[in-house]
Image (cartoon, grey):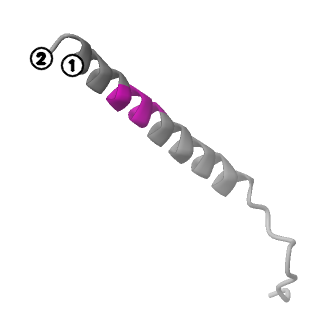
Amino acid sequence: MSDHEHGKMDITEQEKTFEGFIKFWIYLFAASAAVLIFLALFNS
């Protein structure tokens, strides 16, 4: 087994997963805000 060297690990998959996670929450927040605005405008 080789010794670990700080900063040499390939983290491209983790970065892609994190980017997808953040995009999901941004879209969810935007959709929730849109629903609340719709309800406020039409007094539902």
Q: Mark 1 is on which residue type?
A: Leu
Percent x, y for residue 7?
Answer: 86, 73
Q: Which of marks 2 and 1 is nearer the N terminus?
A: 1
Residue 44: assigned label = 2
Q: Quadrant of residue 9?
A: bottom right
Q: Who's the residue at 49% across and 37% down the image? A: 26
Q: Mark 2 is on which residue type?
A: Ser
Q: Is residue 6 above or below residue 17?
A: below
How many C-alpha atoms fall within 10 Å of the one at disc 2: few (<14), some, or many (≥20)? few
Q: Which quadrant does the N terminus fall into? A: bottom right
The part of the chain drawn in magenta is: 27-33
Q: Name the residue under label 1.
A: 39
Q: How far apart are marks 2 and 1 (CA)?
A: 5 Å
Q: Who's the residue at 54% across and 38% down the image? A: 23
Q: Does the magenta stretch include residue 29?
A: yes
Q: Is residue 36 magenta?
A: no
Front-lying residue, 2 or 39: 39
